[in-house]
Image (cartoon, rainbow, N blue to C red):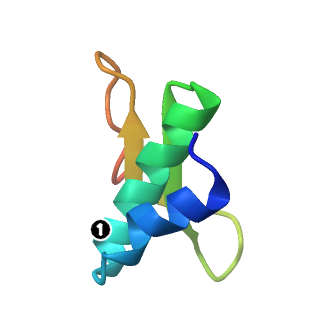
Amino acid sequence: MRSGSNCTDALRSLSDPVDIQGNAMRLLRQHFDVGWCYYGEIDEAGTIVTILRDAVKEGLPSLVGVS
């Protein structure tokens, strides 16, 4: 992964939160060389996480929308 400042540079030009989340997930997935990297929301009870964004390696299914 690029250094922290380079990562910041990659996201700085983005203004849409969805774009920022998606690009951050992509950068993190690439850095850690993992199959999936998720962005999710936890319900008020703290029991259910819903995947809102993800970055996946080629050939793996997206889990967006899974709770």
Near-viewer residue (33 or 45): 33
- Who's the residue at 41% across and 61% down the image? 10
From what the image shows, is residue 42 above or below residue 67? below
- Check disc 1 and give the amino acid type: Asp
- Who's the residue at 71% across and 72% down the image? 46
From what the image shows, is residue 18 above or below residue 66? below
Q: Is residue 25 left or right of residue 4?
A: left
Q: Residue furthest top?
A: 59
Q: Is residue 14 visible?
A: yes
- Residue corresponding to mark 1: 19
Q: Position of residue 18 (x, y in %)?
A: 31, 71
Q: Can you tell which quarter of the image residue 11 is in? A: bottom left
Q: Quadrant of the N terminus?
A: top right
Q: Is residue 43 left or right of residue 25?
A: right
Q: Position of residue 66 (x, y in %)?
A: 41, 48
From what the image shows, is residue 43 above or below residue 59? below
Q: Is residue 49 visible?
A: no
Q: Can you tell which quarter of the image residue 32 is in? A: top right
Near-viewer residue (63 or 8): 8
Q: Badge 1: how crowded within 10 Å, few (<14), some, or many (20+)?
A: few
Near-viewer residue (25 or 12): 12
- Who's the residue at 34% across and 54% down the image? 65
Count of marks placed on residues = 1
Q: Position of residue 62 (x, y in %)?
A: 32, 36
- Who's the residue at 32% across and 27% down the image? 61
Secondary element at image label 1: helix
Q: Is residue 2 left or right of residue 58?
A: right
